Amino acid sequence: MSDDSKGMLLGLVGVVMFSLTLPFTRMAVAAFDPAFVALGRALVAAMLAAAWLYWKRAPLPPRAALLPLALVAGGCVIGFPWLTSIAMQTLPAAHGAVMVGLLPLVTALFSTLRGNEKPTLGFWLMAATGSALVVAFALRQSGGSFHRADLAMFAAVALGALGYAEGGHLARRIGGQQVISWALVLAAPFVLGPALWLGWSQRAAMAAAGVGAWSGFAYVSVFSMFIGFFFWYRGMALGGVARVGQTQLAQPFLSLLGAALLLGEPLEWSTALFALAVLAIVAAGRRMQVRR
């Protein structure tokens, strides 16, 4: 199997894990404050990351990696989780999931602006077509207009895409596992105090929370915030940020399935048609050249 194929496969495994993030986040924010869900999951993941780094006797990251790690921490560890937690208080998980479909296009844009990759015109056409399908699907679900919480989702997409692009390129130098682990450890001092304070102030709600809320918090802490990035950044390192990022076009439809199974949100037959169309575009985009 070529590096491109391995990268696409590993990226898809990461996407499958990420696809359940919004349904489980919605389960968590039903009982907990969005800020606690966002910062608490980062703190739990940071403890797991510190244990992994110690177990692997991982060396300290080079000085040149500090800025990319800071961008990963700001985008993927704090910004994206916090903003999506806010949005999930009012948005259906299915609707928010479709908005996440813009991530691949924005990730490729950031990768190009940073001068790391040069996608061809054909690639941009496929990426824009796939993103247009996703946006059309979102508008169709919402009756032709966006919700106010969509602004939080758009900001989350921008920050998440920046973190994806920076982490994917850095993974070629220090490895995907170290990228997310060091980013989590770097963010830990900033989330420790607020997360503990929020946890203490919500101790009554935490004691009364049911299995669903705690299951949602556990999933986004362990899989969405930590393990999923092992596959995601490794896939980007092998197959390229822009190309592997296109696998995330399938995430909204996997999230819709997860929302239907976990939350009982309606799943329409048209979803399958949109999903097939997007997957066809991902397959076509994989054949377009991306110079690295």
Image: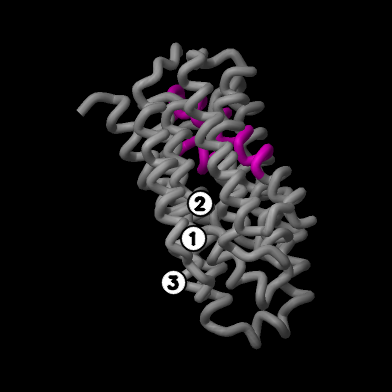
Nearer the N terminus, badge 3 or badge 1?
Answer: 1
Mark 1 Cα within 10 Å, few/some/many (few <14, many 20+)? many
Q: Is residue 54 above or below residue 105?
A: below
Residue 53, can we see it?
no
Q: Mark 1 points at which residue?
A: 256
Q: In this view, does 95 lie above or below 113?
A: below
Q: Does the magenta stretch include residue 170?
A: yes
Q: Mark 2 points at which residue?
A: 252
Identity of the amino acid at label 1? Leu
| Direction from residue 198 to residue 101 in the image, left or right | left
Q: Do the residues labelled 1 and 2 touch (CB within 8 Å)?
A: yes
How much space separates mark 3 and mark 1, taking CA atoms?
9 Å
Between 282 and 202, the one lying in front of the other is: 282
Between 168 and 125, the one lying in front of the other is: 125
- The location of residue 29, given as percent across then percent down, is 66, 70
Magenta-tinted stretch:
157-182
Residue sitting farthest toward the left: 1
Q: Which mark is residue 261?
A: 3
Q: Which image quarter: residue 288?
A: top left
- The location of residue 84, given as percent across then percent down, is 67, 55
Nearer the N terminus, badge 2 or badge 3?
Answer: 2
Q: What secondary structure is marked by label 2?
A: helix
How much space separates mark 1 and mark 2, taking CA atoms?
6 Å
Residue depicted at 36% across the width and 47% down the height: 13
